[in-house]
Amino acid sequence: MLKYLLDQFVPVAQWIEHLGPNEGVPSSSLGRDTMSKHFKIVLFVRFLGYLIFFIGLIGFIFILGPLVQAEVKYRADRLLGVKRTLPHRIVTSQGMESATAGESPKPEGPSSFNNVSTSENIITPVSTDYGIVIEKINANAKVIANVDPGDEKAYTAALANGVAEARGSTAPGQAGNLYLFSHSTDAPWNIIRFNAIFYLLKELDKGDKVVIFHKNVRYDYIVFDKSIISPNDISYLTNSYTSPILTLQTCDPPGTLLNRLVVRARLVSS
Protein backbone atom coordinates (compact mmCIF):
# COMPACT_ATOMS: atom_id res chain seq x y z
CA MET A 1 0.00 0.00 0.00
CA LEU A 2 2.82 2.40 0.90
CA LYS A 3 4.60 1.67 -2.41
CA TYR A 4 1.39 2.44 -4.32
CA LEU A 5 1.01 5.81 -2.59
CA LEU A 6 4.65 6.71 -3.27
CA ASP A 7 4.27 5.75 -6.95
CA GLN A 8 1.33 8.13 -7.19
CA PHE A 9 2.88 10.97 -5.26
CA VAL A 10 6.47 11.06 -6.65
CA PRO A 11 5.57 11.90 -10.31
CA VAL A 12 3.43 14.81 -9.12
CA ALA A 13 6.29 16.13 -6.98
CA GLN A 14 8.74 15.86 -9.90
CA TRP A 15 6.34 17.68 -12.20
CA ILE A 16 5.96 20.53 -9.70
CA GLU A 17 9.74 20.78 -9.38
CA HIS A 18 10.34 21.16 -13.14
CA LEU A 19 7.52 23.61 -13.80
CA GLY A 20 8.00 27.29 -13.13
CA PRO A 21 5.33 29.96 -12.64
CA ASN A 22 5.30 30.68 -16.39
CA GLU A 23 5.45 27.11 -17.70
CA GLY A 24 2.17 25.54 -18.77
CA VAL A 25 -0.09 26.14 -15.74
CA PRO A 26 -0.47 29.05 -13.35
CA SER A 27 1.16 28.24 -10.01
CA SER A 28 -2.03 28.93 -8.05
CA SER A 29 -3.99 26.47 -10.21
CA LEU A 30 -1.27 23.86 -9.92
CA GLY A 31 -1.23 24.27 -6.13
CA ARG A 32 -4.97 23.73 -5.90
CA ASP A 33 -4.76 20.60 -8.07
CA THR A 34 -1.89 19.22 -5.99
CA MET A 35 -3.73 19.87 -2.72
CA SER A 36 -6.87 18.27 -4.11
CA LYS A 37 -4.96 15.11 -5.08
CA HIS A 38 -3.21 15.01 -1.70
CA PHE A 39 -6.56 15.42 0.08
CA LYS A 40 -8.04 12.49 -1.86
CA ILE A 41 -5.07 10.31 -0.94
CA VAL A 42 -5.44 11.20 2.74
CA LEU A 43 -9.16 10.38 2.64
CA PHE A 44 -8.47 7.06 0.95
CA VAL A 45 -5.83 6.08 3.50
CA ARG A 46 -8.14 6.99 6.39
CA PHE A 47 -11.04 5.06 4.87
CA LEU A 48 -8.83 2.01 4.37
CA GLY A 49 -7.61 2.24 7.96
CA TYR A 50 -11.14 2.42 9.37
CA LEU A 51 -12.23 -0.46 7.12
CA ILE A 52 -9.40 -2.71 8.33
CA PHE A 53 -10.14 -1.76 11.94
CA PHE A 54 -13.85 -2.62 11.73
CA ILE A 55 -13.22 -5.86 9.84
CA GLY A 56 -10.75 -6.86 12.56
CA LEU A 57 -13.22 -5.92 15.31
CA ILE A 58 -16.02 -7.95 13.73
CA GLY A 59 -13.69 -10.91 13.28
CA PHE A 60 -12.56 -10.63 16.91
CA ILE A 61 -16.16 -10.63 18.14
CA PHE A 62 -17.07 -13.55 15.87
CA ILE A 63 -14.14 -15.67 17.06
CA LEU A 64 -14.32 -14.87 20.77
CA GLY A 65 -18.09 -14.49 20.98
CA PRO A 66 -18.86 -17.95 22.46
CA LEU A 67 -16.19 -17.59 25.15
CA VAL A 68 -17.21 -14.05 26.06
CA GLN A 69 -20.87 -15.09 26.25
CA ALA A 70 -20.08 -18.06 28.50
CA GLU A 71 -17.84 -15.99 30.77
CA VAL A 72 -20.28 -13.09 31.09
CA LYS A 73 -23.20 -15.41 31.84
CA TYR A 74 -21.20 -17.31 34.45
CA ARG A 75 -19.95 -14.12 36.15
CA ALA A 76 -23.46 -12.62 36.12
CA ASP A 77 -24.88 -15.75 37.78
CA ARG A 78 -22.19 -15.60 40.45
CA LEU A 79 -22.76 -11.90 41.05
CA LEU A 80 -26.53 -12.22 41.28
CA GLY A 81 -26.42 -15.45 43.30
CA VAL A 82 -28.21 -17.45 40.59
CA LYS A 83 -27.80 -21.20 41.01
CA ARG A 84 -28.49 -23.43 38.03
CA THR A 85 -29.91 -26.78 39.14
CA LEU A 86 -30.75 -30.11 37.61
CA PRO A 87 -33.88 -31.75 39.11
CA HIS A 88 -33.39 -35.21 40.52
CA ARG A 89 -36.44 -36.47 38.64
CA ILE A 90 -36.26 -35.92 34.87
CA VAL A 91 -38.49 -37.25 32.14
CA THR A 92 -36.30 -39.02 29.60
CA SER A 93 -36.62 -39.28 25.83
CA GLN A 94 -38.67 -42.44 26.35
CA GLY A 95 -41.23 -40.76 28.60
CA MET A 96 -39.74 -42.35 31.72
CA GLU A 97 -38.17 -40.75 34.75
CA SER A 98 -34.40 -41.00 34.71
CA ALA A 99 -32.95 -43.25 37.39
CA THR A 100 -29.65 -42.98 39.17
CA ALA A 101 -27.12 -45.76 38.73
CA GLY A 102 -28.43 -49.07 40.05
CA GLU A 103 -32.11 -48.12 39.70
CA SER A 104 -34.62 -48.76 36.96
CA PRO A 105 -36.35 -45.90 35.12
CA LYS A 106 -39.84 -45.23 36.46
CA PRO A 107 -42.95 -44.15 34.55
CA GLU A 108 -43.49 -40.41 34.41
CA GLY A 109 -45.10 -39.10 37.59
CA PRO A 110 -46.88 -35.89 38.56
CA SER A 111 -43.62 -34.18 39.58
CA SER A 112 -41.94 -34.79 36.23
CA PHE A 113 -39.41 -32.41 34.77
CA ASN A 114 -42.01 -30.88 32.48
CA ASN A 115 -43.74 -29.35 35.49
CA VAL A 116 -40.75 -27.23 36.48
CA SER A 117 -38.93 -26.54 33.22
CA THR A 118 -40.34 -23.02 32.95
CA SER A 119 -37.97 -21.77 35.64
CA GLU A 120 -34.90 -20.05 34.16
CA ASN A 121 -32.71 -21.58 36.89
CA ILE A 122 -33.64 -25.14 35.96
CA ILE A 123 -31.41 -26.97 33.48
CA THR A 124 -33.15 -29.06 30.83
CA PRO A 125 -30.81 -31.87 29.68
CA VAL A 126 -30.08 -31.75 25.97
CA SER A 127 -30.02 -35.54 25.90
CA THR A 128 -30.79 -38.34 28.33
CA ASP A 129 -29.73 -40.95 25.77
CA TYR A 130 -26.14 -39.78 26.18
CA GLY A 131 -25.48 -36.35 27.59
CA ILE A 132 -23.55 -34.33 30.13
CA VAL A 133 -24.72 -31.59 32.53
CA ILE A 134 -22.48 -29.56 34.83
CA GLU A 135 -24.67 -27.37 37.01
CA LYS A 136 -21.95 -25.03 38.30
CA ILE A 137 -20.94 -23.79 34.84
CA ASN A 138 -24.30 -24.40 33.13
CA ALA A 139 -22.74 -26.84 30.66
CA ASN A 140 -25.29 -28.98 28.85
CA ALA A 141 -24.49 -31.06 25.77
CA LYS A 142 -24.87 -34.30 23.92
CA VAL A 143 -22.06 -36.83 24.09
CA ILE A 144 -20.95 -38.35 20.80
CA ALA A 145 -19.76 -41.90 21.45
CA ASN A 146 -16.70 -43.77 20.18
CA VAL A 147 -14.71 -40.89 18.63
CA ASP A 148 -11.06 -41.38 17.68
CA PRO A 149 -9.11 -38.56 19.47
CA GLY A 150 -6.30 -38.98 16.95
CA ASP A 151 -8.49 -38.41 13.89
CA GLU A 152 -9.01 -34.67 13.51
CA LYS A 153 -11.64 -35.02 10.80
CA ALA A 154 -13.67 -37.45 12.91
CA TYR A 155 -13.59 -35.49 16.16
CA THR A 156 -14.16 -32.16 14.42
CA ALA A 157 -17.39 -33.56 12.98
CA ALA A 158 -18.35 -34.95 16.41
CA LEU A 159 -17.61 -31.73 18.27
CA ALA A 160 -19.88 -29.81 15.94
CA ASN A 161 -22.74 -31.66 17.68
CA GLY A 162 -21.56 -31.91 21.28
CA VAL A 163 -18.77 -33.40 23.39
CA ALA A 164 -16.76 -36.40 22.19
CA GLU A 165 -16.28 -39.68 24.02
CA ALA A 166 -12.79 -41.03 23.30
CA ARG A 167 -12.72 -44.42 21.61
CA GLY A 168 -11.83 -47.12 24.14
CA SER A 169 -13.59 -45.39 27.04
CA THR A 170 -15.55 -47.49 29.49
CA ALA A 171 -19.30 -47.00 29.64
CA PRO A 172 -20.75 -44.60 32.24
CA GLY A 173 -21.00 -46.25 35.65
CA GLN A 174 -18.54 -48.99 34.75
CA ALA A 175 -15.11 -49.44 36.35
CA GLY A 176 -12.49 -47.77 34.20
CA ASN A 177 -11.91 -44.46 32.42
CA LEU A 178 -14.77 -42.58 30.73
CA TYR A 179 -12.89 -39.91 28.74
CA LEU A 180 -14.82 -36.96 27.29
CA PHE A 181 -13.00 -34.24 25.36
CA SER A 182 -13.57 -31.02 23.49
CA HIS A 183 -10.78 -29.59 21.35
CA SER A 184 -9.98 -28.76 17.73
CA THR A 185 -6.92 -27.81 15.72
CA ASP A 186 -8.11 -27.04 12.20
CA ALA A 187 -8.66 -23.27 12.59
CA PRO A 188 -8.50 -20.62 15.36
CA TRP A 189 -12.22 -19.90 15.22
CA ASN A 190 -13.00 -23.62 15.60
CA ILE A 191 -10.69 -23.89 18.60
CA ILE A 192 -13.04 -21.43 20.27
CA ARG A 193 -16.32 -22.81 18.92
CA PHE A 194 -15.59 -26.44 19.73
CA ASN A 195 -14.31 -25.62 23.21
CA ALA A 196 -17.22 -23.40 24.22
CA ILE A 197 -19.04 -26.20 26.07
CA PHE A 198 -16.01 -26.98 28.26
CA TYR A 199 -14.61 -23.45 28.34
CA LEU A 200 -15.49 -22.99 32.01
CA LEU A 201 -14.05 -26.30 33.21
CA LYS A 202 -11.35 -24.15 34.81
CA GLU A 203 -13.98 -23.02 37.32
CA LEU A 204 -14.61 -26.54 38.66
CA ASP A 205 -13.19 -27.43 42.06
CA LYS A 206 -13.03 -30.53 44.23
CA GLY A 207 -16.52 -31.52 45.31
CA ASP A 208 -18.33 -30.09 42.27
CA LYS A 209 -20.83 -32.38 40.55
CA VAL A 210 -20.85 -33.62 36.95
CA VAL A 211 -23.90 -35.54 35.74
CA ILE A 212 -23.82 -38.03 32.88
CA PHE A 213 -26.99 -39.43 31.28
CA HIS A 214 -26.63 -42.70 29.41
CA LYS A 215 -29.49 -44.78 28.07
CA ASN A 216 -31.86 -42.79 30.28
CA VAL A 217 -29.94 -43.59 33.44
CA ARG A 218 -28.32 -40.81 35.48
CA TYR A 219 -24.75 -41.05 36.84
CA ASP A 220 -23.47 -38.48 39.34
CA TYR A 221 -19.73 -37.90 39.51
CA ILE A 222 -17.84 -35.70 42.00
CA VAL A 223 -14.67 -33.83 40.98
CA PHE A 224 -11.52 -34.86 42.85
CA ASP A 225 -8.68 -33.58 40.65
CA LYS A 226 -7.86 -30.80 38.16
CA SER A 227 -4.57 -30.60 36.22
CA ILE A 228 -2.94 -28.71 33.35
CA ILE A 229 -0.84 -31.00 31.17
CA SER A 230 1.19 -30.96 27.96
CA PRO A 231 -0.63 -31.75 24.69
CA ASN A 232 1.75 -34.70 24.31
CA ASP A 233 0.80 -36.23 27.67
CA ILE A 234 -1.66 -39.05 26.96
CA SER A 235 -1.42 -40.71 30.36
CA TYR A 236 -4.83 -39.37 31.43
CA LEU A 237 -6.34 -40.96 28.33
CA THR A 238 -4.66 -44.34 28.77
CA ASN A 239 -5.04 -44.60 32.56
CA SER A 240 -6.95 -47.65 33.77
CA TYR A 241 -8.95 -47.59 36.99
CA THR A 242 -10.59 -50.19 39.17
CA SER A 243 -13.49 -47.82 39.92
CA PRO A 244 -15.67 -45.63 37.64
CA ILE A 245 -13.72 -42.47 36.77
CA LEU A 246 -14.85 -39.64 34.50
CA THR A 247 -12.12 -37.60 32.76
CA LEU A 248 -12.96 -34.29 31.07
CA GLN A 249 -10.45 -32.57 28.79
CA THR A 250 -10.28 -29.25 26.95
CA CYS A 251 -7.66 -26.76 25.73
CA ASP A 252 -5.83 -24.35 28.02
CA PRO A 253 -5.59 -21.38 27.98
CA PRO A 254 -9.02 -21.20 26.33
CA GLY A 255 -8.79 -20.66 22.59
CA THR A 256 -5.21 -21.93 22.31
CA LEU A 257 -3.46 -25.25 21.80
CA LEU A 258 -0.66 -24.67 24.31
CA ASN A 259 -1.83 -27.07 27.03
CA ARG A 260 -4.67 -29.34 28.06
CA LEU A 261 -6.90 -28.88 31.11
CA VAL A 262 -7.98 -32.21 32.59
CA VAL A 263 -10.67 -32.61 35.25
CA ARG A 264 -11.31 -35.99 36.87
CA ALA A 265 -14.35 -37.09 38.86
CA ARG A 266 -15.43 -40.32 40.53
CA LEU A 267 -18.86 -41.93 40.56
CA VAL A 268 -20.88 -41.48 43.74
CA SER A 269 -24.22 -42.84 44.85
CA SER A 270 -27.10 -40.35 44.96
Image: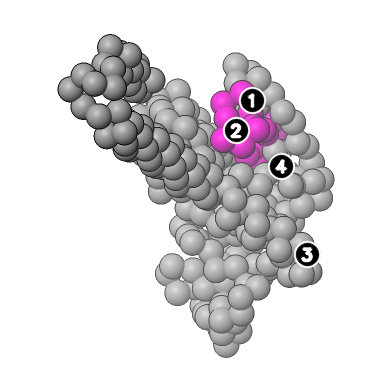
Instruction: Give the residue pinned by disc 2.
Output: 251
User: Tag on residue 79?
Assistant: 3
Quadrant that contains the N terminus: top left
Amino acid identity at mark 3: Leu
Mark 1 and 2 residues: CB-CB less than 8 Å, in contact?
yes
Amino acid identity at mark 2: Cys
- Please tell me which of labels 4 and 2 falls first in the chain: 4
Query: Which residue is located at x 49 percent, y 69 percent?
Result: 92
Query: Which residue is located at x 40 percent, y 25 percent?
Result: 151
Tell me the CA gap for discs 2 and 3: 26 Å
- In this view, the residue farthest toward the bottom is 110
Where in the figure is residue 208, as x and y percent of width and height? 77, 52
Tell me the CA gap for discs 1 and 2: 6 Å
SS label for mark 1: strand
Query: Which residue is located at x 65 percent, y 33 percent?
Result: 253
Pick the front one: 109 or 132:
132
